[in-house]
Amino acid sequence: KNKSRSVSKKLFNIYFSNILVNFQEDSAVSAAFLDIRSAYDNVLVDILIKTIVKLGIPPDTCRFIYNLVSARQV
């Protein structure tokens, strides 16, 4: 079993569950799906994180993105 695919599937399920709950509660819903394979090595982590923080992205999501891009593995 491909471990990275398993992790991706679990993360998708977590986000999908949160989106579904917020939608059912008539709350704001947002989601982003990124195709990062081709540009992954060109990510400037500090600039990316500063930008998403300024955009008001929730702290948990910022940490998730930081951990994803700082690990540099796809």
Image (spheres, rainbow, N blue to C red):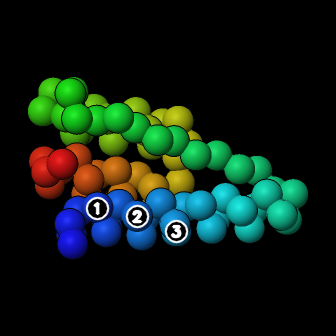
Residues at discs 1 and 2 in contact (Cβ within 8 Å): yes
* Residue under label 2: 9
Q: Is residue 13 above or below residue 26?
A: below
Disc 3 is placed on an element classified as helix
State the residue in front, 39 or 5: 5
Mark found first going from the N terminus, 1 or 3: 1
Q: State how far apart marks 1 and 3 are (Cα).
A: 14 Å
Q: Residue at x 28, y 35 (%)?
A: 36
Farthest residue toward the front? 1
- Look at label 2 and name its amino acid: Lys
Secondary element at image label 2: helix
Circle 3 Cα neighbour tier, 10 Å, few/some/many (<14 / 14–19 / ≥20): few
User: How far from the left and from the top, in percent, is residue 50?
Assistant: 35, 38
Marked residue nearer the N-terminal end (3 or 2): 2
The residue at 52%/66% (across/down) is 13
Q: Examine the rendering and report whether any part of residue 4 can be seen.
A: yes
Instruction: Look at the numbered discs 1 and 3 and tell me whether their residues touch, using CB distance below 8 Å.
Output: no
Q: Mark on residue 5?
A: 1
Find residue 38 and report its horizontal and vertical position in percent: 20, 27
The mark lying in front, picked from 3 and 2, is 2
Q: Tell me the kind of residue under disc 1.
A: Arg
Left or right of residue 26, residue 21 in this image: left
Q: Residue at x 31, y 69 (%)?
A: 6
> Tag on residue 62?
none
Closer to the camera in the image, 70 or 34: 34
